[in-house]
Image (tube, rainbow, N blue to C red):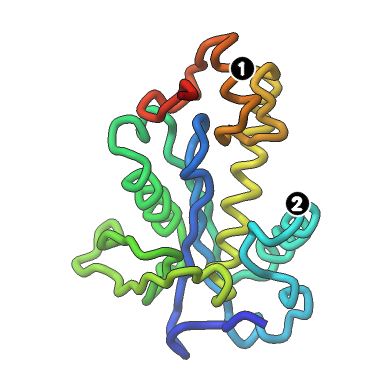
Amino acid sequence: MLLSYYIPNVLEAGCDEAGRGPLAGSVFAAAVVWDSAKAERLAELERLNDSKRMTARERYALREVIEREARAWAVAEVTPQEIDEINILNAALLAMRRALAQLQPQPEHIIVDGNKWKPYIPEGGLMEIPARTIVKGDGKYLSIAAASVLAKTYRDDYMLRLHSQYPQYHWDTNMGYPTREHYAAIAQYGITPYHRKSFRLIRS
């Protein structure tokens, strides 16, 4: 079982993102707040882990549990155009802050997957909310793992919608990542408005 909190008895949000590596599409992020005592009683969460270690079926099944049982949750995105303007790292951090901004109530502490963060001050607030980065946190803490699942599944849904418009890029299977077939499609058909122009789109 993953740990229920980083700091006991504090309203804590876990954050994670999905989609930093693809050549196309938005980057998504999620923020999740658990009632820690309640989370410890949910048998379904025994299966919760880093979303990359789960099957798509497991992720979508757990998304229903997370959305139903979490005290608060939110998902946000940063578009390919914004990614090109501010770079992918800043875009991923911005997506997490956008997700946090939607939470009600606002958290008292934030834990973030990875090793990068920028101060988050809620709108109308005077002070930043304390935060801690945790490398591989999505495999250690429930709230980060839950955020990982939400970010991944919402981004997958988004890429499937884009696939219906641009089926030649096979985004239903590669989700915009730099696969051989994706590079081949770019070479044959060119780029779309959803491609990240700041990324290397031609395979060397």
Q: Amino acid at mark 2?
A: Ala
Query: Residue 2's mark?
Result: none
Say above or below: 59 vs 80: below
* Residue 167 place in picture, x, y as percent: 70, 19
Q: Is residue 186 left or right of residue 121?
A: right
Q: Position of residue 199 (x, y in %)?
A: 40, 30
Q: Residue tagged by mark 1?
A: 185
- Left or right of residue 104, residue 163 in this image: right
The residue drawn where x is 62% and y is 69% is 70
Q: Position of residue 24 (x, y in %)?
A: 51, 29
Badge 2 density bin: few <14, some 14–19, many ≥20, Cα 10 Å: some
Spatial CA distance of label 2 from label 1 is 25 Å
Q: Callout 2: helix, strand or loop?
A: helix
Residue denoted by label 2: 56
Please give the name of the residue rendered at 65% of the width and 49% of the height, measured from the top-left corner: 153
Q: Nearer the viewer, residue 178 or 127?
A: 178
From the viewer's perspective, is 107 left or right of 72? Answer: left
The N terminus - image quarter = bottom right
- Kindly indicate the quadrant of the structure image that contains residue 126: bottom left
Say which of marks 2 and 1 sits in front: 1
Front-most of 127 and 18? 18
Q: Residue at x 63, y 36 (%)?
A: 175
Where residue 81 sits in the image (x, y, percent)? 38, 27
- Element at badge 1? helix
Residues packed near mark 1 inside 10 Å, few (<14), some (14 to 19) or many (20 plus)? some
Nearest to N terminus: mark 2 or mark 1: 2
